[in-house]
Structures are given as C-alpha cells and as structure tokens.
Image (tube, rainbow, N blue to C red):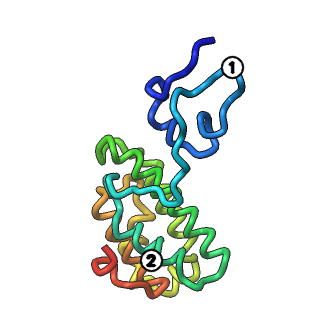
Amino acid sequence: MFPVSWTHLPSWLAALPGTWPHRGVGPWLSVSRPMAPWPEVIPVAGLPVAAPMTLSAVDELCRSACRPDTRRQAADLMLALAAVECHATFGPACVPPALLRDVVIITAGLAGRRWLEANADGAADFTALAATRQPPPLPELDRILAGLLSDRFRLLAPAAAA
C-alpha cells in the first residue's frame, strides 16, 4: 500500500469526528501531516438556511425548560430540518416533498393533537397544511411552522427570532 496524503481525502471524510485519519485505520495507512484537534463547535454560518424561523423556534424550544420528551421531539424536528437544509443546498426544488411532509408530521406530533384541536382558529394555516398533499414553498412553510411552534410553546415571535 502507498501512504495516503491529506489531499487525497474527500473533504467531508476529513471533517468527520472519529473517522480516519483522526483515529487511524491501521498501521498500513499513514497520514502525511498531523491532525488538528476536533473543534467543540462546528460553524454552520455558511450553510443556506431554508427554514430560519422554524430552526430558531426549535432551537429555543430545545434550550427551554420543557419536558424531556418534548425536547426529544424537538430534536427529532431539528434533525428533519437539517435534512431539509442539506437538500436545499442544491436549490429549493431539490427538497423532496416527502421530507417536507415528514417535517409537518413531526411538528404536528410536537404540538399535540389535543392542542391543535383546542386551538383550531390559531392553527388554521397548519391544519390546512396537514390536509394538502403538496407542501407550500419553503418560505411559506417556514412561516407556518414557526408560527405554530411560537403559539404552542409561547416562544418569541417568529420574525423576532430570525
């Protein structure tokens, strides 16, 4: 085998924690330069933001003093929104409608069926969204989801959070 140089690694593989060359894959491969320590915080400011208001609301919810199962559901929603962000890097049309439907379903579970039924007037946009097959464009979906989370969990207004 020949030694692997840093320039031959794909950039996404070189950035993953716990993967080679951070921990090494064996004595038969070597890296030509030392590795820097893995940062505690990964900067994501350069990523396009497909749903900034919803991400802000979910982040605020994850940091709030709510029940652990609510925080877990909020983390699930954040993971789904991260998948939307990944697809949106190639353009809004590249986000699969099924993924957006998953985001709507996870948000409905987070808000709770009883709360949605009790607040039918305030959640009318979301209720109409849940009944459609094709989700609206990302900015409108972002506004609807952030408004629902803001109303349900008494968070900052979506415009103020963005």
Which quadrant, please, contains the N terminus? top right
Among the two numbered marks 2 and 1 on one chain, the one whose residue lies closer to the N terminus:
1
Image point 41% across, 47% down: which residue? Answer: 86
Look at the picture and state if 91 lies above or below 9: below
In the image, is 69 to the left or to the right of 43?
right
The residue indicated by pointer 2 is: 149
Image point 47% across, 30% down: which residue? Answer: 10
Residue 23: percent from left, percent from top: 66, 39
Report, in whole angstroms, how far the alpha carbon at label 2 lies from the one at label 1.
52 Å
Direction top: furthest residue? 1
* Residue closer to the observer: 29 or 89: 29
Image point 37% across, 77% down: which residue? Answer: 147
The residue indicated by pointer 1 is: 28
Image point 67% across, 77% down: which residue? Answer: 68
Classed neighbour count for the residue bearing mark 2: other residues with Cα under 10 Å, few (<14), some (14–19), many (≥20): many
Residue 24: percent from left, percent from top: 66, 33
Residue 79: percent from left, percent from top: 53, 57
Residue 8: percent from left, percent from top: 47, 23
Give the SS element for disc 1. loop
**Which kind of residue does numbered mark 2 sit on?**
Leu
In the image, is 74 to the left or to the right of 67?
left
**Which kind of residue does numbered mark 1 sit on?**
Trp
Q: Are marks 2 and 1 in contact (CB under 8 Å)?
A: no
* Residue closer to the observer: 2 or 122: 2
Which quadrant, please, contains the C terminus? bottom left
Q: Nearer the viewer, mark 2 or mark 1?
A: 1
In the image, is 1 to the left or to the right of 142?
right
Give the SS element for disc 2. helix
Classed neighbour count for the residue bearing mark 1: other residues with Cα under 10 Å, few (<14), some (14–19), many (≥20): few
